[in-house]
Amino acid sequence: MGRPPALPVEEKVRVVLDIIGARITIAQAARDLQVSETSLCNWKRQFLDGGKAGLAEGAGGRAVPGA
């Protein structure tokens, strides 16, 4: 089974906000997006540490325009 394509930063922000707002669990989001719970925990930590810019930087260190 191949790796799913990387999600855009805006999608990661939406998911993290849903997790923080208790609208979805990490386990459910992981199943829905076909990503690991570890990845979602990393996204949440990155967001809390640096907001949207933190998630953009977490994408392999690449700068994302408009982030």
Image: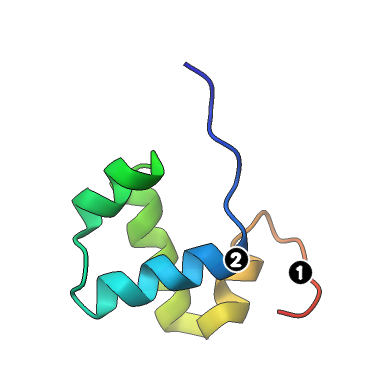
Amino acid type shown at disc 2: Val
Q: Residue at x 24, y 57 (%)?
A: 26
Image location of residue 46, percent across then percent down: 47, 71
* Relative to 57, 35 lies left or right: left
Q: Is residue 58 above or below residue 6?
A: below
Q: Residue at x 40, y 45 (%)?
A: 33
Image location of residue 4, percent across then percent down: 53, 34
* Relative to 9, 38 lies left or right: left
Image location of residue 39, percent across then percent down: 40, 51
Badge 2 marks a residue whose secondary structure is: helix
Image location of residue 37, percent across then percent down: 29, 48
Q: Quadrant of the C terminus?
A: bottom right
Q: Residue at x 19, y 60 (%)?
A: 25
Asked whether the residues under the numbered discs 1 and 2 touch, taking CB atoms below 8 Å apart as contact, a structural biologist would say yes
Counting other residues with Cα less than 10 Å from the Cα at mark 1, is it few (<14), some (14-19), or many (20 or more)? few
Q: Is residue 67 above or below residue 44?
A: below
Amino acid type shown at disc 1: Val
Badge 1 marks a residue whose secondary structure is: loop
Q: Which residue corresponds to mark 1?
A: 64
Q: Which residue corresponds to mark 2?
A: 9
In the picture, residue 48 is in which quadrant?
bottom left
Labels in figure, total: 2
The extreme right residue here reads 65
* Relative to 19, 9 lies left or right: right
- Nearer to the camera, 50 or 24: 24
Which one is earlier in the sequence, the residue at label 1 or at label 2?
2
